[in-house]
Amino acid sequence: MSDIFLIKKPWVTEKVTDLNKSGKYVFIVKPSATKNEVKKAVKEIYRVDAVNVNVINRRGKEKRFRNVYSEKSGYKKAIVTLRPGQKIDLGR
């Protein structure tokens, strides 16, 4: 499997927008993605050098509708720190 399919989409929130000013970008990645694979994918897709990658696994939340309990699916986030002076244009 190619590295470019590991990144599902960029995560854009107010908090992440503030992180972008310090060179950090957040992406939703596939659950099987490792730090090195995310680093290679970011380099291949956006043509920038990642210095550091932090990965966060978010568990799905339990939901209830009347007497039926279910669980929303979880996701994996990757916080990518770029080399100083580099940026990613996410089309905003």
Image: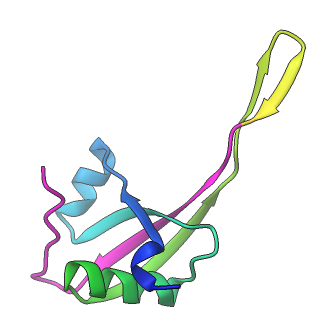
Q: How many numbered marks are there?
A: 0
Instruction: Report the magenta stretch's main SS.
Output: loop
**Protein image colouring:** rainbow
* Residue at the outermost left position: 85
Using the rendered view, name the quadrant where residue 51 is placed: bottom left
* Residue at the outermost top position: 66
With respect to residue 45, does 61 lie above or below?
above
* Residue at the outermost right position: 67
Q: Is 36 included in the stretch rendered in magenta?
A: no
Tell me which residue sits at (79%, 20%) in the image. 64
Instruction: Pick the residue in front: 88 or 79.
Output: 88
The location of residue 4, given as percent across then percent down, is 39, 78
Tell me which residue sits at (46%, 85%) in the image. 2
With respect to residue 34, does 90 lie above or below?
above
Tell me which residue sits at (51%, 84%) in the image. 35
Q: Is 80 included in the stretch rendered in magenta?
A: yes
The location of residue 90, given as percent across then percent down, is 18, 59
**Left or right position of 35 against 51:** right
**Left or right position of 34 against 39:** right
**Left or right position of 56 against 65:** left
Which region of the structure is painted magenta? Answer: 72-92
Instruction: Pick the residue in front: 24 or 77.
Output: 77
The location of residue 41, given as percent across then percent down, is 38, 83
Tell me which residue sits at (37%, 62%) in the image. 26
**Left or right position of 64 against 53:** right
Using the rendered view, name the quadrant where residue 22 is placed: bottom left
The location of residue 3, given as percent across then percent down, is 44, 84
Instruction: Pick the residue in front: 73 or 2.
Output: 2
